[in-house]
Structure formats: C-alpha cells, structure tokens
Amino acid sequence: MKKVLLLTGTTGFIGQSLLKFIEINYEKDYEIVLLSSAVNENYKTVLHKNYTFNKQDFEKNGILKVDIVLHIGAFTPKSGIEANDINKSNANIFNTKYLLDNLPNFPEKFIFLSTLDVYGKIETIIDESSFTNPLTMYGWSKLYCEKLLENWSKENNIILQILRIGHIYGKGEEAYKKVIPVTIQKLKNGENPQIFGTGYEKRSFLHVDDVSNLIMKSILLRKYEGVINLCSSNSYTIKNIVEMLIEISNKKVQIDYIETENRGVDFEFDTSKMNKLLGYEKVNIMEGLKNEYNG
C-alpha cells in the first residue's frame, strides 16, 4: 500500500527537482499530495492556497491521513540583500507553525530542509557538531524552525529528520544571483565572467540530483539522527569553478577580477555522517556543470 507523502515548496529550485526525481524513482511507493502552487495532474490533489488552507481543506480533498511530511517550502534569499528581510524570514517560522497546526493528523515522519546558514562564519571544516551562530535573519529563522520541530516531534512521538542543505547547483537555479548561474549567463552573452576578490575562497557544491536522492533516503531512517548536513565533500575555489565553466563554454574570454576589501570564508565539510546514514554523492562536478550550462 502506498504511503501518503505531503510535499511543500515544490515550485522552488530543489522542490521542482525532487518532484521529478520522485516521479521517476518512487511513483509506486508514494501517493503524493502537493501543498504549493504547483499543479500536476499525476497527483492526488494540490492545495495551493499559500497557507490559507486549514484542516477542513484536507478533508474536502479526501486527505484524512498523511504518513510523511517533507517540508521544503520556505523563503530562501536569492541574493545577499534578501537574507535579512525581516518579514520574509519571519514567514518561515509562522508558516511552519501554521502547517503543524493544520495537518489532518500527526504523521509518522517529518523531514525538514534547513540550511548551512545556521553555522555563520566558521574558519574550520564544518560538521554537524559545529557551533551555530547565524549571520542573517534567514539563518536564524531556519534555526528557530529546527528547535520548534525538535520539540513538536518529541511531544507527539513523530520521527523527525533535519537536513541542512549546503551549496546546491544544477538546472533550475537561474533565479539565484550566485556564482554558477551568473557566470553561465555572462558566458552565454559573450561577456567576461567576474570574480569578486581573488577567487580563492573554497566552496563545496552538491548537485541537485544528489540532494534529491539523499532527501528520499532520509525517509528510510528509523529514528531521529540529529541534524545531517547534505553537502559535497569535494571543495573547489571559486576560480576553479569559473575556469571549468569557461572550458565548457569554449568561449574566448578572460576573468575580470573585482577588487574587494574582504576575503570570503571557505566552506568545506566533513560529510562522514551523511555518507554513513544516507550514502555518497554521485554527480561529478564537471558533468554537473556541463549539464547545467547546456540546459
């Protein structure tokens, strides 16, 4: 018998990829209910009321029980300027609480996508024991949701899993003003890509297909394992990434370096907990970048 899987946030970058991944790999295992503005005739129902839904709406749509909740939906800043938007950050907390209050039942499992932004500025390799000290309102809102869900799940005997999502890339991230999509757009326009500073800051990029696979693996966990970082164990400098994209594009361009006073921090991760409990990343960075560039 299929489990009823409720997904929020399936119009976002990760959500869209995850929905496609489920369609391909888990169609026989789950009956999908979408709580977003996405419309897909393959699914039992779509509640797309931007958190104006309530328990009666579930009943009207014939949803009397949800087995698993996968809460992806949230405000995610598309640029650094948005990261301290108070109203949007607060909405992450209010909407999560609203969701909990209006579910048709207490589910068996609740998977929550958090963010590495809860760690703040850390000069060493990051793992799940690293100190949390967010630098933005967005980071604080996600950390608050983590604590809220830990208490709620414990009180109601629900298996929780918190997944802190790292730097993700792949098709669908065009809306974000980040180094990979911005560089790709410049290359396609025949412009020189730009790097702020020296470009020697390290980043650990994980492909969105790997993220989708690891998220679905987390549903199989039988108890709360504490937070798990979903990140790549392979780090590259920003300069490395831009050079790879130039090679993929075959464009005769050079990198324009923009002077800046501050050197960005490195983001490198110990992924041993992820690897042990959920598995390893599979997508090679060069292949992933080619796929995004040609997409």
Image (spheres, helix red, strand yellow):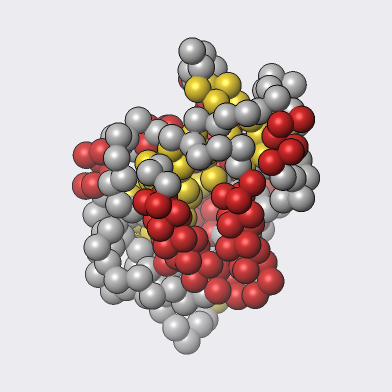
Regarding residue 96, the answer to whether it shows in the image is yes
Q: Choose top left, top right, bottom left or bottom right for residue 117.
A: bottom left
For image coordinates 40% across by 33% down, the residue present is: 219
Q: Is residue 65 above or below residue 144?
A: above
The quadrant of the picture occupied by the C terminus is top right
Q: Is residue 204 above or below residue 43?
A: below
For this rendering, which residue is in front, 44 or 172? 44
Q: Choose top left, top right, bottom left or bottom right for residue 23.
A: top right
**Residue 55 locus on image (x, y percent):** 69, 41
Q: Is residue 28 above or below residue 60?
A: above
Q: Choose top left, top right, bottom left or bottom right for residue 203.
A: bottom left
For image coordinates 46% across by 60% down, the residue present is: 148
Q: Is residue 24 above or below residue 115?
A: above
**Residue 179 locus on image (x, y percent):** 54, 59
**Residue 12 locus on image (x, y percent):** 64, 46
**Residue 237 locus on image (x, y percent):** 37, 61
Tell whether 277 sits left or right of 187.
left
